[in-house]
Image (spheres, rainbow, N blue to C red):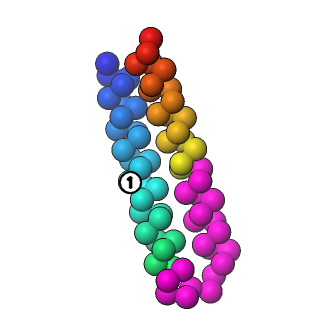
Amino acid sequence: MLEQTETEQQLERLRVEHRDLDEIVDILIKSGHQDEMRIQRLKKKKLRLRDQIARLESSQSLQADA
């Protein structure tokens, strides 16, 4: 049970970080920010976070099925 709670907390932290990065990227794009490398790095980080979230959600659902 404790492991489940830790996983849920980690998922929430990752979701918040992903949402924050999404907002930052949107602001940079809308402001006409010229640092494309920075925007691309942030987008890649968002993708890595999304992958981590998906893996945790998948393992969480597998644990629930067991």
Query: What is the residue that sits farthest to the front in this orientation?
Result: 65
- The crowd level at tag 1 (other Cα within 10 Å; few <14, some 14-19, many 20+) is few
Quarter of the image with the N terminus in it: top left
Quarter of the image with the C terminus in it: top left
Measured as percent of width and height from the top left, residue 55 is found at 54, 35
Q: State the extent of the magenta-drawn residues as a range.
A: 29-48
Helix, strand or loop under label 1: helix
**Which residue occupies 47% across, 64% down?**
22
Q: Could you tell me the amino acid type at mark 1?
A: Val
Q: How many marks?
A: 1
Residue 28 located left or right of residue 17 = right
Instruction: Give the quadrant of residue 52.
Output: top right
Magenta region includes residue 10: no
Depicted 65 relative to depicted 58: above or below: above
Residue 65 located left or right of residue 55 = left
**Which residue occupies 41% across, 63% down?**
20
Q: What kind of secondary structure does the magenta stretch mostly adopt?
A: helix
Measured as percent of width and height from the top left, residue 21 is found at 47, 64
Query: What is the residue that sits farthest to the top in this orientation?
Result: 66
Measured as percent of width and height from the top left, residue 8 is found at 36, 34
Depicted 29 relative to depicted 46: above or below: below
Depicted 13 relative to depicted 18: above or below: above
**Which residue occupies 48% across, 20% down?**
62
Judge by depth and name the residue closer to the eye, 60 or 41. 60
Q: Which residue is mark 1?
A: 16
Judge by depth and name the residue closer to the eye, 34 or 26. 26
Magenta region includes residue 32: yes
Instruction: Give the quadrant of residue 4.
Output: top left
Depicted 2 relative to depicted 66: above or below: below
